[in-house]
Amino acid sequence: MPQRYGDFATWTGSLGTVAAFAVGFWQIRRERTERKRREASEWLAAKREHADRVSAWRTGDEIIVSNGSHHLIHAVRIVLDGHDPIDLDHVEPGRASVPLGVHGATVPVTSLTFTDARGDRWVRDAGELPRRITQEESA
């Protein structure tokens, strides 16, 4: 007794169904990957919200630290080009000035490192956006 494997239309329909499932799963995976990427970007932007508002610069014989966020920042370290770093315990919201006691040529602020209210450690190099640093980088 010969075995029947079906006609061409049945095989074509079956392959079409399998292809539709494959395309559906591929599209779901692609959308999920894109959603995860977007959520990670939004998460970092939310974390960076306060860090974006913190900066420091030199004017004359003092350094101005501007904390434009509404939260205290602490463990602040200001690095000047060619000088010892300046460490501050904390900076309240608003502006704080740190007298240098150094007269003469202007020495730029090369980086500002601080911890925000959430406990995240940030570094802001001159002319750059702040970036979150890990425990290994800060050690």
Image (cartoon, rainbow, N blue to C red):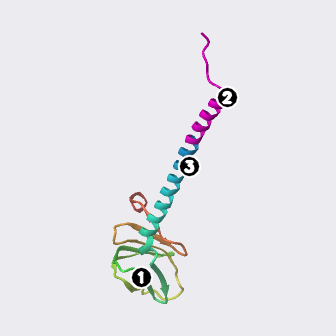
Q: Which amino acid type is marked by label 3?
A: Gln
Question: Which percent across, then down, holds residue 43?
Answer: 44, 64
- Which label sits in the foreground, 2 or 3? 2
Per the image, label 1 sits on a secondary structure element best described as loop
User: Toward the viewer: 39 or 18?
Assistant: 18
Compute the Cα span from label 2 to label 3.
28 Å
Q: Earlier in the sequence, mark 1 or mark 2?
A: 2
Question: Which percent across, then down, holds residue 34?
Answer: 53, 56
- Which label sits in the foreground, 1 or 3? 3
Q: Which amino acid type is marked by label 2?
A: Phe
Question: Which percent across, then down, holds residue 138?
Answer: 41, 62
Q: Earlier in the sequence, mark 2 or mark 3?
A: 2
Q: Which residue carries the number 2 mark? A: 8
Q: Which amino acid type is marked by label 1?
A: Gly
Task: Name the residue: 62% across, 37% down.
Answer: 16
**Number of dots carrying numbers:** 3
Do labels 2 and 3 touch, CB within 8 Å? no
Task: Name the residue: 52% across, 49% down.
Answer: 28
Compute the Cα span from label 1 to label 2.
71 Å
- Per the image, is 6 magenta? yes
Q: Which residue carries the number 1 mark? A: 68
User: Toward the viewer: 21 or 56?
Assistant: 21
Q: Earlier in the sequence, mark 1 or mark 3?
A: 3
Q: Is residue 94 above or below residue 3?
A: below
User: Toward the viewer: 22 or 17?
Assistant: 17
Disc 1 crowd rating (10 Å Cα; few below 14, some 14-19, many 20+) is some
Task: Name the residue: 46% across, 89% down.
Answer: 61
Stretch of the chain drawn in magenta: 1-21
Per the image, label 3 sits on a secondary structure element best described as helix
Disc 2 crowd rating (10 Å Cα; few below 14, some 14-19, many 20+) is few
Q: Which residue carries the number 3 mark? A: 27
Per the image, label 2 sits on a secondary structure element best described as helix
